[in-house]
Amino acid sequence: MGGSIYLRPRYLTKVPGHNAQQIGVAIMSSGTPQLLLMPVTAARLKKLGARIWLTAGIVLIGASYFMNYSRKMLFMSCRKMMRTNLSSRTSARSSNKRLRFGAGPPGTGW
């Protein structure tokens, strides 16, 4: 959490190019639900106990890590397939070009 206090505004400044007011609105909008849910959470914590909430939190964090890892692996495999398809297409095009146009100039390797 401590890193997000510094990193999120830096990210919003550098990548999308937001100004200070837009960054403030984005950070305030993420903190407002936390502020409003504090009394509700305290009441439920007294009713159910801390173990259930801690277990649920750890399970949700683990699930988010798993989904992030799975998405990353899926993205990497898709990129690999695209590279393979593109390289096979370019080699097929070049071989078709060789067959279509015959031998090239001497010393070109055609």
Image: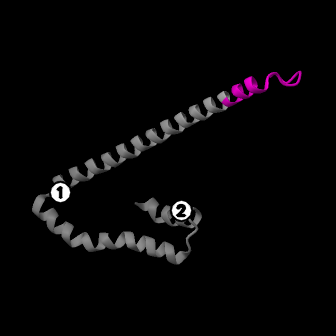
Of residue 76 and residue 61, the one placed in the foreground of this image is: 76
Q: Is residue 77 left or right of residue 45?
A: right
Quadrant where the N terminus is found in the figure: bottom left
Magenta span includes 108: yes
Residue bearing mark 1:
50
The residue under the point 15% across, 68% down is 43
Q: Is residue 52 left or right of residue 28?
A: left
The x, y position of residue 93, in whole percent, is 68, 31
Disc 1 residue type (three-letter): Ala
Q: What is the magenta range?
A: 93-110
Disc 2 residue type (three-letter): Tyr
Element under label 1? helix
Magenta span includes 96: yes
The x, y position of residue 3, in whole percent, is 46, 59
Residue bearing mark 2:
11
Earlier sequence position, callout 1 versus callout 2: 2
The x, y position of residue 70, in whole percent, is 39, 41
The residue under the point 44% across, 39% down is 74
The residue under the point 43% across, 61% down is 2
What is the quadrant of residue 109 in the picture? top right
- Asked if residue 88 is positioned above or below residue 20 in the image, the reply reads above
Q: Is residue 100 left or right of residue 45?
A: right
Q: CA distance from mark 1 to mark 2?
A: 34 Å
